[in-house]
Image (spheres, grey):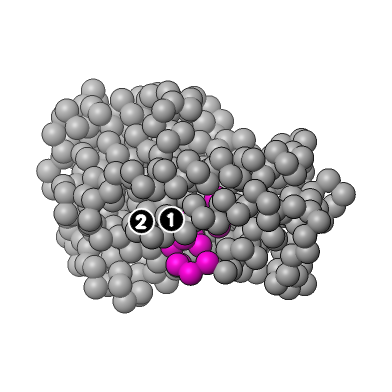
Amino acid sequence: MRPPPADRLRNVEEAALDSSYLSLGNRRTESVHEFYRYPARFSPELAASIIDAFSEPGDLVMDPFVGGGTTAVEAQRLGRRGVVADLNPIATFVTRAKTARYRQVELREAADVVERFHEALTLSRRPKGQEHWQDLGYWRNVSTSTTWRIRRTIELALDLVSTMRWRRSRLLVRCGLLRTAQWALDMREEVPAVGEFRRQLIGNLHSMIEVAQDADRSSAELRVVDRGLPELAHYPAVKAAGPPRLVLTSPPYPGVYVNYHRWKVQGRRETPAPFWVTGSRDGHGLSHYTLGARADKSLDTYFARLTSAFEGLVSIMGDESWLIQIVGFSDPTNQVPRYLAAMEALGLNEVSLSSGLRREASGSGAIFLSAVGGCRPALWATSLPTQLARSCSATERQRDLRLDAFVEGTDRVKCG
Ligand SMILES: C[S@@+](CC[C@H](N)C(=O)[O-])C[C@H]1O[C@@H](n2cnc3c(N)ncnc32)[C@H](O)[C@@H]1O
C-alpha cells in the first residue's frame, strides 16, 4: 500500500500536535460537533486531516467505536461514505443527531416547539408520560432537592417532544435537551436555577437549528449502526458495504475510566439520566462500555476484549484498508508495548509514516516523537518490523499508523 503524499501527512502531524482546538474558536461553537460533548472525543481537525490523507472522496470510512460521532461528521463533510457503530445508544443517538440531513419542514417544527418552551416549561404544570423512567431507575440522583426542578423541566419538554410529528425534529430537540441537561448536571458543583436552564435550552436549540440548516454536508451515504465489536462484523449492512478504505477510530483506553454512559451530578453522584433523555436503555455497567478497563488492575480482561473486538474488525478490513487509532494510555511505558503486541498478534503492524520520521515499513525500532506523560500524550509514532498477516485472507498487512493524540473530555477521564 502506498503511503499518502507527504503534504497530507504533514497536515495530520500538525493537527495532532496542535492543541488550539481545545479553545472554543468559532468553528467549535458553531458546528454540529458541539451538539453534544461526548467524553474522550478526538479533535475534528485531526479526524479531517486523517480522512483527507488516507482516503479519497467516495471511499468508505468506518469507525466502529464512534462515540460522539467525530469521524462520522468529518467523513460526511468530506464526501466519504461511512459506516459507524457503537454499543452505547447515547453515542449512536448523538451521532445521528449530528449527521441527520434535516428538511426545512423538520427544522420549522423544531423551532415551533422551542417557541412553546417559553411558557410550557413552568414548574406549576404537571408532566405526564415520563414516570415509568423513574420506575426503571433512570432518575437516580436527579430527584434530589437540588436537581428535581431541572428533571421536571426535562419531563415537560419531553412531553412536548412526544407530540411532534417528524422523527428528525424529535431527534434534534431531544439532542438539545441532552446537551443542556449535561451542561446543567454533569461535573459542576452548582445546579443552575430552572429559569437559567430554560434560557440555556432555548438558546442552545436556536443555535442548533441554525447550524443544522447551514451544515456543510455532502450527499455521501452514512450508516449508523447500534452494534458493538466483534458482533458488528456479522451485521448485514457492514458485510454488504465491503472493506473500508480507512478505519479511523478510538477504542476505550487501557486503565483509563471514562463515564461514557453516565453524568456525575455535582461532580460526584452518577446518574443514568442521559438514557432517559435520549429515550434509550442501558442495563449494563461501566465495564460494558470500557472493554472492562476498570474491572481488573492487570488489564487482562481489557486486552482479551480488545483482541476479540479487533478480530472482528480485522475480518471486515481488506488488503487496502488503513487503520488509524487514537489511543490514550494511563501508563504508556507498560501499556504501549502490550497494546502493540496485541495488535501484532492480529496481523496489524504499525508503520511510521510521519514525514519527519519517515522510515520504510520494514524498519525496526521505535521512534518517540513527542509525548507528555499521564493520559495526555501528544503525538507518538513508532515503527516496528513488518510482519506477514497471521490469518485472514490478506497476505500483507502494513496498515496501521497509531497516533496518540491529545484527547478531549479529560475532565471525565481518570488515569488508573
Ligand atoms: C474513546 S470513545 C470514542 C470517542 C470518539 N472517537 C469521539 O470522537 O467521540 C470509545 C467508544 O467505544 C465504545 N465501545 C466500547 N466497547 C465497544 C465495543 N465492543 N464495540 C463498539 N463500541 C464500543 C464506547 O461506548 C465509546 O463510545
Q: Kindly tell me whether mark 2's CB lies below 8 Å from ligand 1.
A: no
| Part of the protein shown in magenta | 164-176
| Residue closest to the far right | 145
Residue beneath disc 2: 104
Q: Residue 50 location in percent, x, y? A: 27, 40
Residue 167 is one of the magenta-drawn residues: yes
Residue for point 33% across, 45% down: 215
Q: Is residue 381 visible?
A: yes
Q: Magenta stretch mostly in which secondary structure?
A: helix
Q: Quadrant of residue 53?
A: top left
Q: Nearer the viewer, residue 173 or 118?
A: 118
Residue beneath disc 1: 108
Q: Quick check: 8 above or below 184?
A: above
How crowded pointer 2 is (Cα within 10 Å; few <14, some 14-19, many 20+) is rated as few
Q: Residue 197 location in percent, x, y? A: 68, 43
Q: Nearer the viewer, residue 389 or 161?
A: 161
Q: Which mark is residue 2?
A: none
Q: Is residue 180 left or right of residue 111?
A: right
Q: Quick check: 228 above or below 322?
A: below
Q: Kindly tell me whether mark 1's CB lies below 8 Å from ligand 1.
A: no
Q: Which amino acid is tagged 2?
A: Gln
Q: Secondary structure at mark 1?
A: helix
Q: Is residue 379 visible?
A: no
Q: Secondary structure at mark 2?
A: helix
Q: Pointers 2 and 1 in contact (CB under 8 A)? A: yes
Give the Cα distance between marks 2 and 1. 6 Å
Q: Which amino acid is tagged 1?
A: Arg
Residue for point 49% across, 52% down: 111
